[in-house]
Structure formats: structure tokens, C-alpha cells
Image: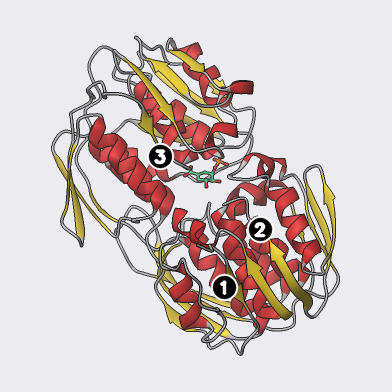
Amino acid sequence: MSDRKTVQSVAMKGGELRVPGDKSISHRAAMLSALANGQSRISGFLRCEDCLNTLSAVGQLGARVEDLGDEILVDGIAGRFVQPEGLLDVGNSGTSIRLLAGLLAGQPFETIMTGDASLCSRPMERVAVPLRLMGAEVVPEGERGCAPLRVRGGELEGIDYRLPVASAQVKSCVLLAGLYARGTTRVIEPRKTRDHTERMLQAMGVDLGVDGLDVILQGAGPDLPQLRTGEWSIPGDFSSAAFWMTAAAITGSEVVLTHVGLNPRRTALLDVLRRMGCDIEVTEAPSTEWEPTGTVRVRGGQLHGTVVAGDEIPNLIDELPIVAVAGALSEGETVIADAAELRVKESDRISVVAEGLRRCGADVEERPDGMRIVGQPAVAGNAVVPTFRDHRIAMAFSVLALKAVAPVTIEDASCTGTSYPGFWVDLEQMAPGAVSSCAVCD
Ligand code: S3P
């Protein structure tokens, strides 16, 4: 059965859309609710493959999970998980394995986590190193420091840890282990990254402060962490909305994304698209939620190239494939720099994006930490794009196809379900007639 879809340029209809829930927040809502003292309720949980893997992992670790459809109820275990039977398989999800490693470092038993071929080729020493310093035994059992990841928890001591790379996953891992540690855990970031973990822990009553680039947390030590339960209403995922914002940008149409997360550590794409020439209006919802949300209206136009680098990178790390697409369809040059982390995402997103762009007829030069693209009004298309089953590659090139002279075929089209179930249906709504039917659809 073919798992390809062909996307062709049509008149983009645009309009209003509410994208599914935020992936990063859904992972954390499942894990932290599982840890809390009592029952938490989660609405808007993203039922993508990655987050469902986290939910099933916390179930295997002893939390009771009840899916009511519009809400998920999680009965937390008050700080002490139970040893799972067998391996925890988290599929494609880097967030699951790295954040759970932090929690498991504080448990008095051994767990082995694994995942698919992509996950088992991604670096795990970056979490193993600080967890060992805190007192856990953490062994990446794959080749070159990769998963499967064996974690034997122990009595942990707080540490001061300067992150060698800007990574919210590593920061969160250390903070979650810090909940179990004696004394203070301080994480020093080289650049600010998404702070969903910090916001949720504060909402659950954890003593956590932020001082510039330092995040400081007081651990429970021999007493187990006592987290208040939560009522989590999860906003739409800015990283999913980003595909429609960019589709409007390159086609000169208009989209309105409602109830989307507007955490400032996630929204740097808005600044980039504005610099490129888009007209963007943001209306923040008056809310008391722990995360800002609102509506984003994007009107596209004639785009011009820009430079994306430095502190901006962590705040649009997952949007860089779609930024590259925007660059390929802008006047002049777009440069992405300081983004070597892209090479260790679900695929090597620098080489995979550069290869896809080349196949579609764009002018791109791959660099160690990014790429340089010389844009044009439309790309030739008439290409098959390999995705390496990376969801964001599949979605980025589907958007590119809206401005290709001839159709573009996306391989492994079903991999969009990793983060965005319903992507193909939404593409058909935004751009009717753009997608050719195929055997594997969601
Ligand atoms: C995530 C952080 C980012 C991001 C990933 C989700 C998270 O990874 O790319 O998709 O939920 O914390 P890094 O923090 O490793 O850059």
C-alpha cells in the first residue's frame, strides 16, 4: 500500500482554523499529572502518536488513565512510580524518553526505554551526563550513546548544571530529576528555550524560580515531591499552526488561527514572517491560564529573505524546515545559522530539507549549522521528496507544493500523525483540491 501523497498548487482558500493541542504541553501534562497527589484533568490533549506513547508510558508506571473523549483523567501516584513490566517503548518521541529519564532517575528501580529507528539514533548522553552527576545510573545501550536507555534510579543530589546545548528537553529532564534531589538544582541555559515545564511545575506548587538564564528548583530529597493536581486546558500547537501561517505567507492569502498557544519562547516565527513582509495581527485572549493563548491572523504578500540565527533559534527550532520553505519562495537570500541542533532531530533536518529543496528546484547551499537559500517566486516541483518519516519534513514540503509549478509527492505521508493528526484533512480545507487521494490517509 502506498504511503505517498501528491500535493499540487491550487488557489489557497485559507480562512479560520483551530489546530490540535500543543505537543510539548500535552507530554508534560500527562507526566506531571501522573506524578501529582490525586486526580488531574486534561482537556485538549493532543492525541498524536508521540503523546499517546507518553500516556501509555505513565500508565505502565502506575498512573491510572481514563480517556473520556473530551477530557483525560489521570490519577497521580503521589511521587512514586511502580516498576513497569518490560520495556517502555516511546516510539518516535524524544520528549518522552528525555523527560521520563529525569523522572525515572528518582525512582528506586531500573527501567529501560526504547523507541523506533529514528529515536534510537538520537543522542542520549546529553541527559545521561547530568543524571549521573546527580547520582543515578544511566546507560545508553545503543551505539554511540543512543537508546535503548537504561535508567537505575538512586538517591539524588541537586547540582548546578550548565547546559552544553540549548535544549528544553535536557533542561526539563534535569529539573524533573531535581524534584527528587536533596537540595537545590540549578540549570543554566546558554540561550532561553521553551519554559512549559517551569510554568507547570510552578502551577503545581513547586518551589521554582528563574533568574536570567538560571532556573532554580528546590528538591524534595528523601521526602517525595508533593505536586498539586492540575486542570490543564491545552492550547493549540503553535508549531502546527506555523504551517498554515507560512502557507498564507507564500501564497498571499489569509489565515486565522484560533486558540493557539502564544508562549513567547515558541513564537519567533511571527517575528521572522513579519521581517519577511507578512502582515500579522495577534490578539491575546484575556485569560488566567498558565500559558498565554490567542488568535493569530496572517496575511501573506511579497516576501523577502531574512537571516535567522542566534537567540531566535531555540524559539523556532521546530519551525526551521518551514522557514526554509518560506525562504525558497522569497525574493533574495535567506540564511539559517546557529542551528546545528537540527541535525539531531527526528531526521537530520539540515540535510533532509536541503535535499528536498534541491529536488523541488530551489537554490540551496547546505552549511554545518544551517543553510543559505536564494529564493524565487515559485519552485519547479515535479519531485518526490523523501521525508525519512519526519513529520515536520512531510508537512513543510506539502506547504511548499502550494507554490510549485508541477506537483510534489511526499513520501511516508502518514508520518504527519506523529504530531498533527488531521493534517491532510486541514490541508484540504485550507487549499481544496491540493491533495491527491492515496491509499493511506488520516
Ligand atoms: C521539545 C523541545 C525541543 C523541540 C522538540 C520538543 C520539548 O527539543 O525540538 O520538538 O517538548 O521540550 P530540544 O529541547 O532538544 O531542542
The amino acid type found where label 2 is placed reads: Pro
Residue closest to the eye, 337 or 141: 141
Mark 3, secondary structure of its residue: helix
Q: Position of residue 272 (x, y in %)?
A: 67, 64
Mark 2, secondary structure of its residue: helix
- The residue at 68%/44% (across/down) is 348
Q: Is residue 224 above or below residue 411?
A: above
Whichever of labels 2 and 1 marks the residue nearer the N terminus, that label is 1
The amino acid type found where label 3 is placed reads: Glu
218 lies left or right of 168? left
The amino acid type found where label 1 is placed reads: Met
Near mark 2 (Cα within 10 A), the count class, few <14, some 14-19 or many ≥20, is many
The residue indicated by pointer 1 is: 245
The residue indicated by pointer 2 is: 321
Whichever of labels 3 and 1 marks the residue nearer the N terminus, that label is 3
Of badges 2 and 1, the one in the foreground is 2
Of badges 3 and 2, the one in the foreground is 2
- The quarter of the displayed image where residue 178 is located: top left
Q: Position of residue 85 (x, y in %)?
A: 26, 23
Q: CA distance from mark 3 to mark 1?
A: 28 Å
The residue indicated by pointer 3 is: 198
